[in-house]
Structure formats: structure tokens, C-alpha cells
Amino acid sequence: MNNETSVTAIHPDVERMLVSEEQLRQRNIELGAAISRDYADREVLIVGVLKGAAWFVSDLTRQLTCDFTVDYMAVSSYGAAHKSSGVVRILKDLEVPLEGRHVLIAEDILDTGLTLKYLIRNFLARGAASVEIAACVVKEGAQEEKIDVRYEGFVLPNEFVVGYGLDYAERYRGLPYIGVLSPRVYEDA
Ligand code: PRP
């Protein structure tokens, strides 16, 4: 296979790589070990927030030795202009009740924190016994809401990042690394 068709070659729209495939693999092993220790004596329900978290959930759960089940939610904020309102619309809800469950929300990225603030409050209102957060990426200095991330993958600069589930206009999610999107991609759009 030549480099131009390899998924591991850096994509021409990616300005620079921030987190390599190997670093992601290693961090998932570490996070998986910490989660497995913390939930050794109780079953945890892992809630992935679609679509971006699907990649993280898939890799992270393969590192768990504790008892767990997985469910997914799809949410959307009411358009970028209204994001600061913190109003989140549920596009796909959970299939299981949360009463008495220990929930671990898995997010691909913590940006403003508005999505997670809404979800934490919503899950506690449904009777979850505990709600913790695992975030693959935390954007440095971007949070408008203070969110306590128990399992943090990588703190990255506040730039437009893509890959490993993170998209721009639904593209680049499948890149096996996380990188900064070249500004010319959205400037030309
Ligand atoms: C992203 C990400 C989080 C949210 C974080 O989802 O997956 O759910 O934004 O942003 P916040 O901290 O500012 O609330 P997005 O709406 O892009 O959907 P996607 O996962 O389908 O790409």
C-alpha cells in the first residue's frame, strides 16, 4: 500500500497531529485500568454520547475487567448560535432506566461543558446512583461550565481538532489519530 492511500498517513487536511494512534491506545489502557479498579465492586453503565464517542467507547470498553453494560444517547444543541443557552435536544434516548445505576458518561470531547452539564443533571433526575465522566479530549480553557472529569484522556489546546470520532461537517471521524484541522478547510467552506 502506498502512503497516499494509507489511513495512518497524515491526512492532507490535517495541519498537525496532536495525539497519535499509539498514544490513544496507551491512554485507553490506563483509563480502562482506573475504571476497572473503581468499579470493581459494582456494575457500571457506560453511556456513549453519539456520534463522536463511539470510537472512544469501543476502544475503552475493550480494556475493562469490571462488569459493565453500554448504552448510547444522541443529543444535539439547538444550533451553534444558541449553544450558550445550554438547551440540549435528545435525538435518541437511553434504552434502560437509570434508577439506582452507576453511570459513566463517555464523551469524545469536553468543549464548553454545556452538553455534559445537561446530561449529568438529567441522569441524576432519573435516579442514577452516581454519574461520572470519561472524556477522551478536554479542550483547554474552553469550559463555560465547571465539569468534574474523573477520567481524562488528553488536554488539548483550544483549536479545531478532528479524528478518533471528532468531525468537521461529519468528515474525518475515522482518522485513527487526533489532529488540528487545517484552517483552509473551513475558511474555504
Ligand atoms: C460534540 C461532543 C460533545 C459536545 C461537546 O458533539 O461529542 O457531545 O460536542 O461540546 P460542549 O462541551 O460544548 O457541549 P457534537 O454536537 O459535535 O456531535 P457529534 O458527536 O455527533 O459530532
Image (spheres, rainbow, N blue to C red):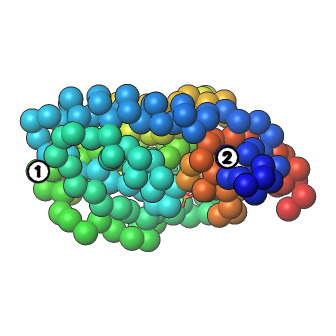
Residue 20 numbered mark, or none: none
**Relative side of 32 to 172, left or right:** left
Badge 1 amino acid? Gly
Report the quarter where the C terminus lies: bottom right
Which residue has dot 2 on it?
Answer: 8
Numbered circle sitting on residue 100: 1
Q: Position of residue 139 (x, y in %)?
A: 59, 34
Regarding residue 87, the answer to whether it shows in the image is no
C-alpha gap between disc 2 and disc 1: 43 Å
Q: Farthest front residue?
A: 1
* CA neighbours of label 1 inside 10 A, class few (<14), some (14 to 19), many (20+): few
Secondary structure at badge 2 equals: loop
Classify residue 112 by image quadrant. Answer: top right
Query: Is ligand 1 closer than 8 angstroms to the Cβ of mark 2?
Result: no
Give the quarter of the image for residue 71. Answer: bottom left
Residue at image location 44% in from the left, 71% down from the top: 91
Residue 132 placement, left or right of 86: left
Q: Tags 2 and 1 in contact by the CB under 8 Å rule?
A: no
The x and y percentages for residue 88 are 46, 60
Q: Of 83 and 181, which appears nearest the observer?
A: 181
Residue in the image at 41% along x and 47% along y: 59
Amino acid under label 2? Answer: Thr
Q: Circle 1 — which element?
A: loop
Q: Quadrant of the N terminus?
A: bottom right
